[in-house]
Every structure is written in C-alpha cells, then in structure tokens.
Amino acid sequence: MTNPLLRKTAFAVALAVTVCCPPLAFGATPEAIVAAPDRSDADRQGDSIREPVKLLQFIGAMPGWHVLDMAAGAGYSTELMARAVAPDGKVFAQAGRQSDKFAERLKTPAMANAELVVTPADNLSNPSLTNLDLVTFLFGYHDTTFLPVDRAKMDKAIFDALKPGGLLIVADHSAKPEDGASVGKTLHRIAENSLRSEIEAAGFVFVAEGDFLRRPDDQRTTPSSQNAASVDNFVLKFRKP
C-alpha cells in the first residue's frame, strides 16, 4: 500500500509544477505537417526524394521560432518551416528575385506567417533578419559557387542574423571530395568537406549530420537533376556559439 504521506507529497509537487510551469504548447508533429490535407500535389510529389518527416525531425524547429529560408525557390521548404513554427512563429524566405510560383504559394493559409525578402544571398541587411532562431539553406548552396555571390560574406551574414545558440541547417547534393566547389554549375553539386569548411570559417560549430538522404551507390559524376532519387545528399546542422 502506498504511504499516504508520500502520496500527498507527490500530489503537492505535481500541483506546484502545474501552477508555476504550465504545459508547453507544442505545434504539429512532423508527421502531421507532412500529412496536412491542404498541401499541394506538387509538394507531395517532391516528398518522395526529400524525406520531409525525417528532415523536420532533424531540424527540430519549434512553434514561435523566427526562421530564414535561404534560396527559397518555389517555397517547398519555406512552407514546411511556416507550418512547423506556426501559429506565432515567422518565416522569411530569401530570394534573389520575385517568383510567380512563390507568389501563388503566399496566398495560401499555410503561408500566413511567411514573408518573401528579395535580396542577394550575401546581403542580409534587412532589419527583419536579426536575432533568428534558425536558418535553413536546402539544396541551394551549390548555386552560389557559380553565381555572383561572395560566399564568405554570405556565410558571415547568416551567422550575424542568428541569435547566440541559433541553428543553421544546410543540405545539398554531394560531389566527390576532390571536386570541391568546382562543379556547382555543371553537376549542381558541392563537396561536403568544402561546404563544411566554408561554414565553419564563418564561426559556426558543427553539431550533427543526418544520413536519411544518403545514397552510397551514387558515383557523383552526373548532374544531380538526373534521376534525383538516386543522388547522394548530405544534411548538416551547425550552431552559432
């Protein structure tokens, strides 16, 4: 039989915790976000090569976070982040120019907490892009190797936009180590070791790697757009100290 005194003490502790520390309000799970019925058919087709549930689990974005999605493109990852940080969070989508597809996406309810910021990747001087919790740079870093972008300046700008302890998630198509950053335009890939060195040079600390998009049989000699399901991809997490 349970000691009555112990039972009363446990109840008192539980009551105190409830009063002073109310339960946290968690958002939708990654599974629920990806299964949301209002996601587009096009995004669902992209899920087959993006593993969005595992990606969201790896990123770990929380409701209320402020996020910058670099190289937002048509907004696939921007929308995932907008759903993850809703209802009180905010997502800024960086793009070098306006996009009709992104503009259409912005009209949907899921993007109510998202905002497009048209600015070069190496110029994040917009006053909204400060004290961020998270920056995502998904499958677009390799493009900066052949576009007129100062990558060292860009990486430092991302670092400065984050709050201390803020996270940077970078995913990209893997090139052979010896190819470095030289095949961005031809193969749309970048070597993991080269990218990591550049990011760490900006002051970031490596935290973890996700292996859920690895394809070890990929010879990494063909453009990443060919047979995308067989392309080897790396996903890296960094933290601003």
Image: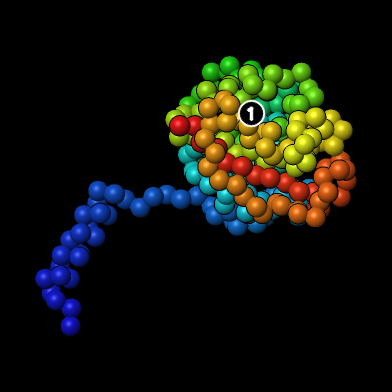
Q: Residue at x 45, y 32 (%)?
A: 241
Q: Residue 155 lies in what quarter of the image?
A: top right
| Vertical comparison of 35 with 78: above or below | below
Depth check: 61 or 82 in front?
61
Judged from the image, the secondary structure of the residue bearing numbered disc 1 is helix
Tell me the residue that label 1 is attached to: 198
Depth check: 64 or 235 in front?
235
Q: Residue at x 53, y 52 (%)?
A: 28
The location of residue 166, given as percent across then percent down, is 49, 34
Q: Residue at x 14, y 76 (%)?
A: 3
The location of residue 73, given as percent across then percent down, is 74, 33
| Vertical comparison of 227 with 205: above or below | below
Left or right position of 192 against 230: left
Q: Residue at x 78, y 22 (%)?
A: 147
Name the residue at the left extreme: 5
Would residue 232 be visible to someone looking at this image? yes
Quarter of the image with the N terminus in it = bottom left
| Vertical comparison of 159 with 86: above or below | above
Q: How is the image coloured?
A: rainbow
Left or right position of 155 against 164: right
Depth check: 34 or 152 in front?
152
